[in-house]
Image (cartoon, rainbow, N blue to C red):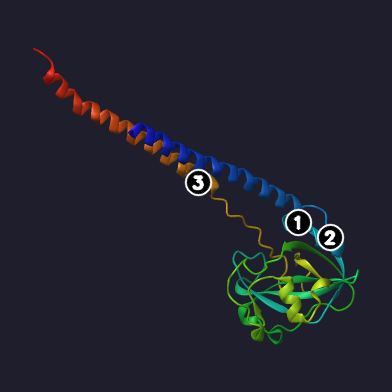
Amino acid sequence: MPAILLVVIVAILVSLGNWQMRRLSWKLGLIEKVETRLNADPVDLPGPDQWADIDADAIAYRQVLMSGRYLDGEFHVFTSLSDPKGKYGGPGYWVMTPFRTAAGWIVFVNRGFIPQDLKEASSRPGSEPPEGEQTLIGTIRQAEPEGTGPSLAAEPEKNIWYRRDPAQLAAAAGLAAGEVAPYTVDLNGGQGPAGGLPQPGETKVTFNNPHLGYAMTWYGFAASAIGVFIAYVMGRRRRSKPANQKASPV
């Protein structure tokens, strides 16, 4: 019976380790794919004719080129910027501004990061978006609809949001949902105001990749189970040997 139990336990532990190795392979492939997209030449934004069947994973982190004009308004999405590329970091906000493309539809552009104590535009003169026709290069980011990201409720009266949800931001801006792209675009570095805020080019590209460690843990548990069983069997043999000797004729 102990041997059968050992086989079952080891099989379960090894299968968990194998599953983590498969996850590791998938994660490494994803990281490679994202790095390739980040270094690729920019392409046109996916337009309304593609929105219905758009694959968010397939377009995430794609480099895009877009022309158009910024619309009025900026919306603040709370974040905490660790290891910033620019001067500012810590708790603060992404500045999301609607951008009407040359084709007529709208995409929310993350113009960059602002520190928490510089939330109000009046505290950072010169941070307004440039006027007139603009050509921008950015990075597509997946939408963060309800159920993703922080579960905190938005505070529209304070202009504080906790998810980059184009539909939510469109409603706050009084825009028709059907003309707003179902993704956002992070403005790449080097396209910010002269004053430095908002601070663009802070796209977070981080992947939690603990799968190798998890796999080694499961395999280690399996090896430990085998070791415990071997010790158990050897112990039983040592304990049974004296009894056998006493039962033997002299």
The answer to whether the residue labelled 2 contacts the one labelled 1, judged by CB atoms less than 8 Å apart, is: no
Q: Residue tagged by mark 1?
A: 55
Residue type marked 2: Gln
Q: Mark 2 and mark 1: span between their CA atoms?
A: 9 Å
Query: Along the polypeptide, which appears first: circle 2 or circle 1?
Result: 2
**Residue at x 15% of width, y 24% of height:** 243
Q: Quadrant of residue 77?
A: bottom right
Image quarter where the N terminus lies is top left
Q: Residue tagged by mark 3?
A: 213
Q: Residue tagged by mark 2?
A: 50
Query: Along the polypeptide, which appears first: circle 2 or circle 3?
Result: 2
Residue type marked 1: Asp
Residue 247 at x, y = what percent?
12, 19
Q: Nearer the viewer, residue 15 or 125?
A: 15
Vertical placement of residue 204 versus 164, above or below: above
Residue type marked 3: Gly
**Residue at x 48% of width, y 38% of height:** 14
